[in-house]
Image: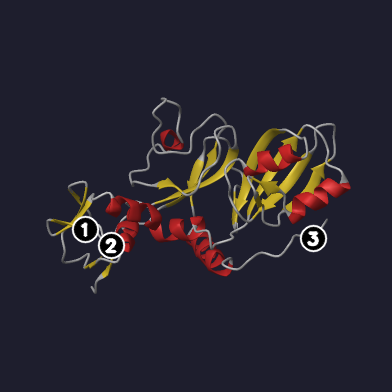
Amino acid sequence: MSQERLQKILAQAGIASRRQAERIMQEGRVSVNGAVVTELGSKADPERDHIKVDGRLIHARRRLVYIALYKPNNTVTTVSDPEGRATVMDLLRGVKERVYPVGRLDFHSEGLLLLTNDGELANAIMSARTHLPKTYVVKVNGELSAEQERQFRDGVPLSGRRTMPAGLRLIRKAENPWYEVRLFEGRNNQIRLMFKHFGRLVEKLRRVRIGPLELGPLKAGQFRHLSLEEVRKLKLATREARTEPRAESAP
């Protein structure tokens, strides 16, 4: 096998996403044939060279695993939590491979979460260049006006930077209505902050779709393995999404 960049080898081995692998290298935790390597452009042959992370030998290829999980409320989207709170990893009973969450959902948010050991796909989904749409259903404590809906779709200022165009559709009219929200970016607490900008508080938030991948009939805490066709469509979607999205039209 020809030489490849170290961060790509680490990602393919399921150690971390490519971005996280770069940080691991810069921290001096990676060695090749006994020599610590911190330069990001460094290459190695995963079949011939002895590549170690934190002193442990890694293998170039692993069986790639793709899991769709329904993250429950009051659960942390991390591998471990210093405060001792329940994490999404606690739900993956019977999964032998080392997988990690792709992106995150806030502690009080629920719904679809992808976990995998495919660092290449994880990096593609989380890359700032990839505007893969993510769809949520959101319950708020009051309806937006038509003008507020227009502003929501066009983008609102958050921390001095306007959000990208978003999709918004009222799906259940009530005193506490439900909206469908479609985002092309993933800032921290973005949906909650966007509604707060208009004086509305989010009561419930559930992600139901990541690109072509749907939550489906999963219940809170349940997970399933993706089909080969779902993986193919997800990879294709990440390639097609690497262009600026157009503004969503009003329903």
Q: For the residues labelled 1 and 2, say whether their Cβ atoms are less than 8 Å apart.
A: yes
- The image quarter in which residue 178 lies: top right
- Type of colouring: secondary structure
In the orientation shown, which residue stands out farthest toward the right?
146
> Residue 118, labelled with which disc?
none
Decide: is 122 above or below 143.
below
Q: Position of residue 190 (x, y in %)?
A: 63, 44
Is residue 97 found left or right of 89 in the rendered image?
left
Q: Which residue is mark 2?
A: 6
> Taking the image as drawn, is residue 118 in sight?
no
In the orientation shown, which residue stands out farthest toward the bottom?
2
Foreground residue among 138 and 192: 192
Q: Which residue is mark 3?
A: 249
Tag 3's secondary structure? loop
The residues tagged by marks 2 and 3 sit, at their Cα atoms, a distance apart of: 43 Å
Is residue 190 found left or right of 50 in the rendered image?
right
Q: Which residue is mark 1?
A: 37
- The image quarter in which residue 51 lies: bottom left
Is residue 35 found left or right of 193 in the rendered image?
left
**Mark 2 or 3 closer to N-term?**
2
Q: Position of residue 111 (x, y in %)?
A: 59, 41
Tag 2's secondary structure? helix
Q: Neighbour class for label 3 at 10 Å: few (<14), some, many (≥20)? A: few
Amino acid found under the numbered disc labelled 2: Leu
The residues tagged by marks 1 and 2 sit, at their Cα atoms, a distance apart of: 9 Å
> What residue sits 53% from the left and 59% below the top?
128
